[in-house]
Image: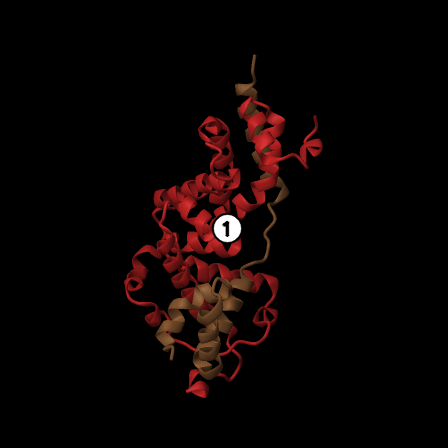
Amino acid sequence: MTVSGLAGSDETTLVAQARQSDATAFSELVRRYENKIFRLALHITQNREDAEDVLQETFLKAYEHLDQFQGNSKFYTWIVRIGVNQALMKLRRRKTDKTVSMDEQFDTGEDTLVREIAAWDEDPEERFSRDELGRILDAAIQGLEPLYRSVFVLRDIEDLSTEETAQALDLSIPAVKSRLLRARLQLREKLTRHFKRKGDNAFAYL
Amino acid sequence: MLTCKDFLRELSDYLDENLGGEARTQLEQHIAACPNCWVIADTTKKTIRVYKGTYPIPPEVEARLMQALERKTAAKEPK
């Protein structure tokens, strides 16, 4: 059967076939999730070369350990978990992640994460070219501590549920929630510098 | 009456629409009365939105992935 012939196949069937060393079935699973894994690897590692390595390592590892996939979670959650682990490992190995030491202030309450309050335009991203916007978004997310970044990427970019994110990162649900809130607020703060409405400042609201 | 601190604590659940009934009404009342929290909610919502764009995998990256998998699966092929 060709890969395209499997496009409509049920995931459980594909996994079962892949476990029988059916390479075509596994290729279809890869095709379904490669974009998501590459994107999350790119966001977490912030490096294109590392993201490609993570992508390959993730699917090779998954193929190798398919027999360990229990089937009590979704295949996607399982593969995301492998991907996130590979990406975080890559970061640790590189040890050039300059953000790690910068975020000690995270231990304080949420209210300290809001410093600047200024309204944005309706579509602030339209003020920037695609490249400029990409650089702004990358720089902001790069400033987050890796675990906060991972939570944000899984919840808000990849649209995993809180439960799935908790599973993928081995965190409790309250830990996912508090990291997500802090990641969102920190990004908001960083983006405000670029996106605030011209001539606006906090005092207009006080 | 909800304080700004209470509002901030519930912000994620509010934006994710996980809150219903009384809790949601209270937050909405707070936002309507507090311009600062309105701005925080609005800009946080936009923060999430601007990150939602898609980055498709570049074709050459996909090709290398498929090659690596082919090598792997060939080695594991049932005899």
Q: Residue furthest front?
A: B21
The chain to which mark 1 is attached is A
Viewer-proximal residue among B16 and B60: B16
Q: Which color mode does the image show?
A: by chain
The answer to whether residue B5 shows anywhere in this view is yes
Residue type at numbered disc 1: Leu
Residue A82: image x %, image y %? 44, 39
**Residue at 56 percent of width and 58 percent of height:** B52
Position of the C terminus of chain B by quadrant: top right
In the drawing, does residue A179 fall left or right of residue A32? left
Colour of chain A in the rendered structure image: red
Q: Position of residue A145 (x, y in %)?
A: 36, 56
Q: Residue A29 or A11: which is nearer the viewer?
A: A11
User: Could you tell me if residue A45 is visible in this image?
Assistant: no
Q: Mark 1 points at which residue?
A: A160
Is residue A140 shown above or below A33? below
Question: Residue A141 is drawn in which quadrant?
Answer: bottom left
Question: In the shown orientation, is residue A171 left or right of residue A45?
Answer: left
Chain B shade in the render: brown
Residue at (51, 34) in percent of width and height: A59
Residue drawn at x 35%, y 74% is B5
Mark 1, secondary structure of its residue = loop
A24 in relation to A162, above or below: above
Circle 1 packing at 10 Å, graded few (<14), some (14-19), many (20+), is: some
